[in-house]
Amino acid sequence: MQRTRLLRAASLMALILSAPAVPSLAGEAAVSPTIVMAKDFMFAPTSLTIKSGSTVTWTNKDDEPHTVVSDAGLFRSSAMDTNESFSFKFDKPGTYRYVCSIHPRMVGTIVVQ
């Protein structure tokens, strides 16, 4: 009986210690990744507002390759084939414009708050 209680207590402690951290109640929110699709020769959404510290992932859903290139030179993907992705973490507030260097009419904007 005592051994069963000890095993249960050890299992419960292991579960508690392995649980993910919860954001504090002081207003800190968890920052999660955001996805932009390249589809039908356009980025969707074309404009996205995120919090500083967020990661944006662009995924190519077209049958043609696409790139993601910052106008300011902050980031540049290689050519992404169908279902390939590129990610970038935005640490500073600002407005970031980007384009597909292969198809310059494909443009988008990330606004970081």
Image (cartoon, rainbow, N blue to C red):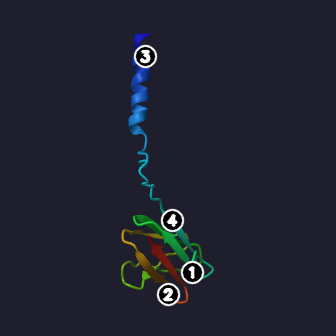
Residue positioned 44% across, 15% down in the render:
4
Give neighbour class at mark 3: few <14, some 14-19, many 20+ (Cα, 10 Å): few
Residue type, numbered disc 2: Ile
Q: Nearer the viewer, residue 82 or 33?
A: 33
Image-based side of 110 in relation to 40, left or right: left
Residue to which mark 3 is pinned: 5
Question: Between marks 1 and 4, how big is the CA–CA gap?
Answer: 22 Å
Question: Between marks 2 and 1, how big is the CA–CA gap?
Answer: 10 Å
Q: Which mark is residue 64?
A: 1
Q: Quadrant of residue 40?
A: bottom right
Q: Quadrant of residue 95?
A: bottom left
Residue positioned 53% across, 73% down in the render:
48
Residue positioned 41% across, 48% down in the render:
24
Q: Secondary structure at mark 1?
A: loop
Residue to which mark 2 is pinned: 102
C-beta proximity under 8 Å, tags 1 and 3: no
Residue type, numbered disc 4: Thr
Q: Which mark is residue 94?
A: none
Residue 91 point in image, percent of width and height: 36, 68
